[in-house]
Amino acid sequence: MQSEESYQLFKTDLCGFCYRVRGFMAENDIDIPLRDINQDVEAYRELLSATGRGTVPCLRIQRGDEVQWMFESLDIMRYLAEKHAA
């Protein structure tokens, strides 16, 4: 049984690793809200206060009241592949 999770991808348009994750999402029909830390000051503040880092890409994973933050494009793609396997 898969637990109910929601996601947000924190990214910038200047980040090649962000494009890698977004390309993977597009190829696999994975639709996740995007938060651009260069365009959205609140997104940047949230990322920085929660993780102590302003690094993207970062996947915000929410399970109920629990929030997990995942950096590294390959880790994010691997995690999403496992969660969205048919």
Image (tube, rainbow, N blue to C red):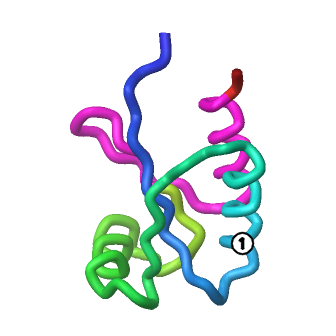
Residue displayed at 43% across by 82% down: 37
Residue displayed at 73% across by 43% down: 28
In the shown orientation, is residue 23 left or right of residue 4?
A: right
Task: Look at the image and give the residue range highlighted in magenta.
Answer: 60-84
Q: Quadrant of residue 38?
A: bottom left
Residue 47 pos. (x, y %): 37, 71
Residue 19 pos. (x, y %): 71, 72
**Residue, far left:** 65
Per the image, the residue denoted by label 1 is: 19
How many labels were placed on the picture? 1
Residue displayed at 39% across by 67% down: 51
Given the image, on which type of amino acid does mark 1 rest?
Tyr
Q: State which quarter of the image contains the C terminus.
A: top right
In the shown orientation, is residue 38 left or right of residue 55?
A: left
Q: Quick check: 36 above or below 77?
A: below
Q: Quadrant of residue 6?
A: top left
Depth check, front residue: 17 or 13? 13
Residue 36 pos. (x, y %): 46, 79
Dot 1: what SS?
helix
Residue 56 pos. (x, y %): 57, 74
In the shown orientation, is residue 83 left or right of residue 59?
A: right
Q: Quick check: 30 above or below 58?
A: above
Depth check, front residue: 42 or 49? 42
Depth check, front residue: 11 or 31? 31
Residue 54 is a magenta residue: no
